[in-house]
Image (cartoon, rainbow, N blue to C red):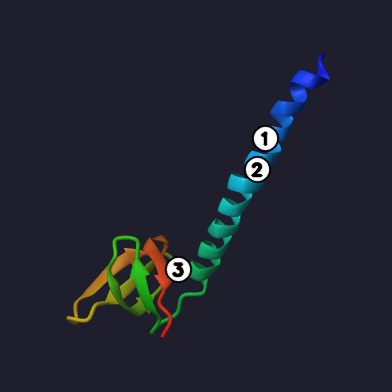
Amino acid sequence: MNLGGLLPLLLMFVIFYFLLIRPQQKRQKAVREMQTNLKKGDAVVTIGGLHGTIDTIDENTVSVRSKDGSVLTFDRQAVREIKQA
């Protein structure tokens, strides 16, 4: 087998791994940790763009209270970020 023809393909895979796959895995790990560490009273933003405060939380769902007082229930995975004060 020709090593000269295989080397560019291998090099492209290594570059692809370090530029795309590895950073995506780190982001997914950070999001999982954030969703695991959610607690009542955290100010959050959902993936749909709703801003609110966690009212109740259980293993799979969170109830978010918006500024107008309405409470909506979401899957825990629907929380995109915790807003910093």
Residue 11: x percent and y percent? 72, 34
State how far apart marks 1 and 2 are (Cα).
6 Å
Tell me the element at label 2: helix
Q: How many marks?
A: 3
- The reply to whether dot 3 and dot 1 touch (C-beta < 8 Å) is no
Looking at the rendered image, the quarter that the C terminus falls into is: bottom left
SS assignment at label 1: helix
Q: Kindly identify the residue that appears in the image at 72 percent across and 27 percent down.
A: 8
Query: Which residue is denoted by mark 3 in the rendering?
Result: 59
- State the residue in front, 34 or 27: 27
Q: Nearer the viewer, mark 3 or mark 1?
A: 1
The answer to which image quadrant residue 76 occupies is bottom left
Residue position marked by numbered label 2 in the rendering: 17
In the image, taking residue 19 as reference, residue 14 lies left or right, namely right
Q: Amino acid at mark 3?
A: Glu
Residue contact between numbered discs 1 and 2, judged by CB atoms under 8 Å: yes
Q: Residue furthest top?
A: 1
Amino acid carrying mark 1 in the image: Phe
Q: Residue at x 40, y 77 (%)?
A: 83
| Label number found at residue 50 | none
Q: Dividing the image into 4 quarters, which one contains the N terminus?
A: top right
Residue 13: mark in rendering: 1
Q: In x, y percent, where is residue 29? A: 58, 60
Q: Earlier in the sequence, mark 2 or mark 3?
A: 2
Picture quadrant where residue 69 is located: bottom left
Q: Residue at x 29, y 61 (%)?
A: 48
Residue type for callout 2: Tyr
Q: Position of residue 50 (x, y in %)?
A: 27, 68
From mark 2 to mark 3, how far is it between C-alphas?
A: 33 Å
Which of pointers 2 and 3 indicates the residue nearer the eye? 2
Q: Residue at x 67, y 33 (%)?
A: 12
User: What crowding class fits label 3: few (fewer than 14 Cα within 10 Å), some (14-19), or many (20 or more)?
Assistant: few
